């Protein structure tokens, strides 16, 4: 039987020492990169959705997708039934995607804070 390496994120455990600043920065960059790729993929899906359901130009599709993903709302009026269904689903997805991206970026920072707080609390 072979042991498979887990692809889940590894954070230091309760009894492990705090990561060095260099290791922490590398972890933060890795999580930030993943969040940027995730948001970029979400933006690309929105651009393609507006392009093919509403037949908008690539630039207008980008503008609409970016505004929805950023929480501002659409710029162009949605005309088709498919476009309206897409816009509603994309708006719901975008709200969750932004929260997920913030959680991904904040996870290492929050974990380091809590880990340091726990280590300092133990020594007292």
Image (cartoon, helix red, strand yellow):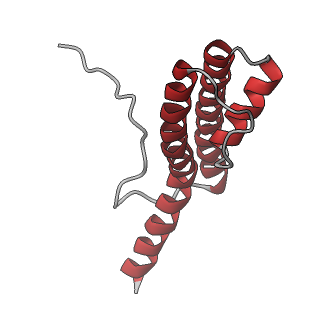
Q: Is residue 4 above or below residue 70?
A: above
Query: Farthest left residue?
Result: 1
- Percent position (x, y) of residue 66? 71, 36
Q: Quadrant of residue 63?
A: top right
Image label count: 0
Q: Quadrant of residue 114?
A: bottom left
Query: Which of the pair 26/98 is nearer the observer?
Result: 98
The residue lying at 64 percent from left, 40 percent from top is 68
Compare residues 74 and 123 and report the one nearer the observer. Answer: 74
Quarter of the rendering occupied by the C terminus: bottom left
Residue at 82%, 23% in the rendered image: 59
Relative placement, left or right, of 90 versus 68 is left
31 vs 114, left or right, is right
Quadrant including the N terminus: top left
Residues 18 and 85: in front is 85
At horizontal 74% and vertical 18% (from top left) the residue drawn is: 56
Measured as percent of width and height from the top left, residue 24 is found at 60, 51
Instruction: Name the residue furthest bottom.
Output: 124
Residue name at image x 44 percent, y 65 percent: 115
Locate residue 93, reporting x and y percent.
49, 37
């Amino acid at each position: 039987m072979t042991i498979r390496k887990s692809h889940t994120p590894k954070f230091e455990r309760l009894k492990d020492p705090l990561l060095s600043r260099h290791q922490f920065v590398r972890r933060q960059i890795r999580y930030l990169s993943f969040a940027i790729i995730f948001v970029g993929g979400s933006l690309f899906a929105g651009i393609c959705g507006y392009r093919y359901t509403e037949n908008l130009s690539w630039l207008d599709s980008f503008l609409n997708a970016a505004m929805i993903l950023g929480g501002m709302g659409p710029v162009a009026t949605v005309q088709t039934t498919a476009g309206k269904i897409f816009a509603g689903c994309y708006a719901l997805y975008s709200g969750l995607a932004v929260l997920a991206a913030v959680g991904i970026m904040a996870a290492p920072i929050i974990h380091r804070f809590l880990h340091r707080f726990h280590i300092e609390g133990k020594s007292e």
